[in-house]
Amino acid sequence: MQFPDDDNGQMLQAMVDAGMDLTQSLDIDFFLVFDDRRDAESALEDLTANDESAVLELQFNEEVEKWEIIASYNMLPEYDAILAKETQLNSFAAEFDGMTDGWGVMQHQDGDDFAGDDDHECDEHCHH
């Protein structure tokens, strides 16, 4: 696969290099950050009311010292679709004095071949 040479393309290439199947839908987490808690709560309220496809979480990110909404969408990890969702969410966040701060996926999701961690020992009850 060939991806554009930007942050999104590099992330998708890293996913391929890690053995992830980009032909399957994944839960993709988009991060929206806000300086002010009230702005983040207002944005969360609006997203909750108007975007039923997202799983939403609000937390304080101590690393960047900002309030963060994690908006998770189950979607195909296609470059154009991710770019469109990121652009849409950035415009949305700007309405509440926020902005997007990238996206990511958990490496091991339903349907991949992950069998456990390195400490796992198989026995007669294993089904992998």
Image: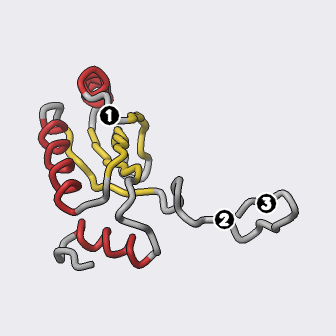
> Circle 3 sits on which residue?
126
Q: In terms of depth relative to the viewer, which is nearer, 98 or 109?
A: 109
Viewport quadrant of the C terminus = bottom right
Q: Which residue has dot 1 on it?
A: 53
Return the x and y of residue 31 as percentages of the image width and height.
32, 47
Badge 3 local density, few (<14 within 10 Å), some, or many (20+)? few
Question: Relative to 62, does residue 111 appear above or below in the rendering?
Answer: below
Q: Give the tally of numbered discs.
A: 3
Compare marks 1 and 2 and give the one earlier in the sequence. 1
Q: Is residue 68 among what the camera can see? A: no
- Place of residue 115 in the rendered image (x, y in percent of width and height, measured from the top left): 66, 65
Q: Quadrant of residue 49?
A: top left
CA gap between label 1 and label 2 equals 29 Å
Residue located 32% across and 34% down the image: 53
Is residue 19 in view from this perspective?
yes
Q: Secondary structure at mark 1?
A: loop
How much space separates mark 1 and mark 3, taking CA atoms?
Answer: 34 Å
For badge 3, the amino acid type reads: Cys
Q: Amino acid at mark 1?
A: Ser
Other residues around mark 1 within 10 Å, as few (<14) / some (14–19) / many (≥20): few
> Which quadrant of the structure image shows residue 39?
top left
Q: Is residue 82 left or right of residue 12?
A: left
The residue depicted at 86 percent of the width and 64 percent of the height is 123
Quote the CA–CA distance across marks 2 and 3: 9 Å
Residue shown at the point (42%, 53%) measured from the top left: 63
Q: Is residue 89 above or below residue 28?
A: above
Q: Amino acid at mark 2?
A: Ala
State the residue at coordinates (12%, 32%): 95
The residue closer to the viewer here, 41 or 37, is 41
Q: Which residue is mark 2?
A: 115
